[in-house]
Amino acid sequence: MYSLESLISLLTMSQDELACKVKKTILKSKWSYTSANNAYIYANFDPNKPKPVLVSHLDVYKDKVPSKREIIVINEIIALKPESKKVLGGDDRCGVWIMIKLIEEGYTDFAYLFCYDEEKGCCGSRQFNLDDGFTCVIGLDRRGTGEFAFYKGHNRAFYKLFIDLGLAPVEGSRSDCAIVSDKMGIASINLAIGFYQEHTSDEYIVFPQTVKVLNLLKNKSLTEKLSNNFFFTESSFPDIL
């Protein structure tokens, strides 16, 4: 059972405050990390053990971080009070929350990449150049639920793993995961994680949908398949879609 309050606390943090929270969480789990100032935080990497890398971003649109008193919760839906002029920040605090929970629970099946300033043009991910034998890239930065976004650099087998879990493929536009994918030559997807109306004061989060993605990533059968194969990019558009 996961607490709404643990996500709400992230929504009220500045980018720098959240970066400190991420670093403390990693160290508390007795893992190491590397970071580049105002670019990224990167944890649980192992060049000798290929694994998928999860990607989320630490900033919110135009740095409009709300205070706790501006946030309301109704039936596990998190939103802003009507008078607020901020953005809720589910984009991408939902993704950061999922990754923090996985780290807290000791899930070593993934490497973890937290990027700065995605909303300003994927600035952090553009500076990330460490290739530790990732098998694929999974972004946690997509509105909605029950789907995944794909970008150029397709891989049929990779997509099929998520289609078989009941997720629908949709074409994406821009995200940190696509930047990392292009650099590494491995396929990426961006999972829908339960936020809606991003970049507006009408943004809201359906918390159970965010939790559902967290639980999906704990699927041992899935993580074994993601770790045992390299999902290199294919030039042709996959007919599976």
Image (spheres, grey):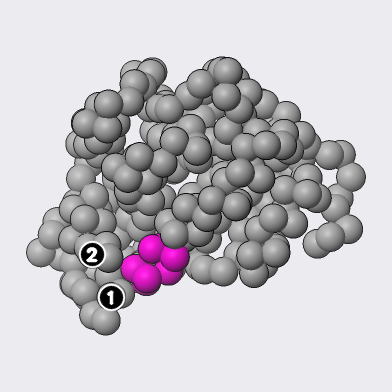
- Please identify the residue farthest to the bottom as the structure is shown: 75
Residue 183 in the image, given as x and y percentages of width and height: 66, 26
Q: Amino acid at mark 1?
A: Glu
Quadrant position of the C terminus in the picture: bottom right
Whether residue 74 is visible, yes or no, is yes
Position of residue 225 relative to residue 69, above or below, is above
Residue 4, label in figure: 2
Judged from the image, the secondary structure of the residue bearing numbered disc 2 is helix
Residue 227 in the image, given as x and y percentages of width and height: 62, 37
**In the rendered structure, are the residues bearing label 1 and label 2 in contact, judged by CB atoms less than 8 Å apart?**
yes
> At 50% from the left edge and 59% from the top edge, which residue is drawn?
216
Quadrant position of the N terminus in the picture: bottom left
Dot 2, how many residues are within 10 Å of its Cα: few (below 14), some (14-19), or many (20+)? Answer: some
| Magenta segment | 206-212
Judged from the image, the secondary structure of the residue bearing numbered disc 1 is loop
> At 34% from the left edge and 68% from the top edge, which residue is drawn?
207
